[in-house]
Amino acid sequence: MTKNVPSPLPTLVPETAPFSEEQRNWLNGFFAGLISLDASGVTALTGDQAAALLGGAPGGVSAEDDDGGAPWHDQTLPITERMKLADGKPLRWKMMAAMAQQDCGQCGYDCKNYSGAIISGAEERLNLCVPGGKETARMVKALAEELKAAPKATTAVAAPAAAAPASSAAPGTSRDNPSFAKVISRRLLNKPGSEKQTWHVEFDLTGSGIEYTVGDAFGLFPANDPALADAVIKAFGAPGDFPIGERTLREVLIDGVSLSPAPDMLFQLFSYITGGDRRQKARALSTGDDPDGDAVTLDVLAAIEKFPGIHPDPEAFIEALDPLQPRLYSISSSPKTVPGRVTLTVDTVRYKIRDRQRLGVCSTMLAERIEPGAVLKAYVQKAHAFALPADPAVPIVMIGPGTGVAPFRAFLQERQAVKAPGRNWLFFGHQRSDYDFLYDDELKAMRGSGHLSRLTLAWSRDSGQKIYVQDRMRDSGRDLWEWITEGAHIYVCGDAKRMAKDVELALVDIVAQHGARTPEEASTFVSELKKKGRYQQDVY
């Protein structure tokens, strides 16, 4: 089809409507035939009217727009269960079900709008759902192939349901428009003897244009450990100064591509340049099979070592790797406390697989590879649904073990700064009370002043019995139920797969026991709290 040729059809759909040129042409023809208009004196439809004719207006939701309540939007469900729940739904909702369901903002969207942007064609990047990992990447790629094969008319009708995030020229407002922040200081929050290493890192935002509110997350663009990049270069035998565009191979490996986990495309590349059993093994790994039972442990270096003697072309090698994504951290400060500053609470991630230590790319960068004065590329990811109540008199219950305390330190600072009269209750847990009581002086001072109405602590390694925050919730169930009946908002921050699920189950039990409800009624009650914005989660 020749582009930019004036259409003889009446212009019923305005250029401001959320459609591509091809979709507008198709819709113009569809609407003209539908309502039997000729081209003389036709008035263009508004975007809302066009959406209404497609069934997408508030009064008439089309099948493409109806997610059926999105039952798959639950981060505690494995992807296999989420895909079953989306079975029979349009591609957009299958695409959403494949996401991690955390609404973390890592991709620059929430799950619903990231999937919608892919379906509409507004977003071509299929690998932005970092929390979803390889499972999501594979499923999204497969669904994208289905989308390509779908009839044009079907994709055109489905497109209005999609929504890309609003772009902004302001620096620091999104991952695509970052700014810069300077590291002011870092201090270790654990005491000697702890098995953890948690850092309080402070940044100066002066001149960055970055603004935030409590509940938001701070995005940082990390760099890989140069020693790891050098090990990768040595493993596949390429010179570090090999030119990749205007940069060197080493430079790109440090700050341009992800070195963990090994992507499917890398194994696909290996299958092209090797033979025999190794080719079959590489092909199996590229499709999600696990012939040796070690696929989940393979980062890029381990993948190269698994196929010794392979020497891919450096440019093809880089093309096969995923881009290095920004990392998000819950902000642990209020801008009302120290304007122009932002703080993060970061666990250093280190673990061993076989004889090699693996490092969290951003957490170890903050802990070891930068010093105060370093300037990092950064932005604020606005919270999708994690904010203090509009009424400062509303009581709040905060449940945040480990670094999950970060946004609640910000909440407490904010409520203290505005002299909010609402009561505040924090559940905090960690391994050992003597070593891992993060921000203990601050929290004890707030408890002493009465600003922190209740502070309930859980220590999992202080005795033979492991005590977690969900256990302390059950211990305080009667009081917690009273707070809920008095309108309290409940907030949870931390691990999505285990802690958040266990906390929700504990809450359901508390509602059933102290609210005199059946388990089914209690579960429905908690679901209603979520719908009303009274149960909010910041999980990862």
Image: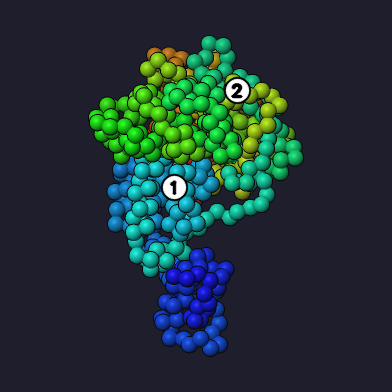
Horizontal and vertical percent for residue 245?
Answer: 56, 39
Residue at the (65%, 33%) spot, across then down = 376
Q: Dot 1: within a 10 Å radius of its alpha carbon, few (fewer than 14), some, or many (20 or more) residues? A: some
Q: Which residue is mark 2?
A: 369
Q: Is 82 on the left-hand or right-hand side of 156?
A: left
In the image, residue 273 sits, relative to residue 85, either above or below, namely: above
Q: Is 269 on the left-hand or right-hand side of 330?
A: left
Q: How is the image coloured?
A: rainbow
Q: Dot 2: within a 10 Å radius of its alpha carbon, few (fewer than 14), some, or many (20 or more) residues? A: some
> Which of disc 1 and disc 2 is earlier in sequence?
1
**Front in this rendered view, residue 194 or 222:** 222
Q: Mark 2 falls on what kind of element?
A: helix
Q: Amino acid at mark 1?
A: Leu
Residue at the (61%, 48%) spot, across then down = 390
In the image, residue 33 sits, relative to residue 400, either above or below, namely: below
Residue 503 placement: quadrant: top left
Q: CA distance from mark 2 to mark 1?
A: 30 Å
Q: Which residue is mark 1?
A: 126
In the image, residue 292 sits, relative to residue 190, either above or below, namely: below
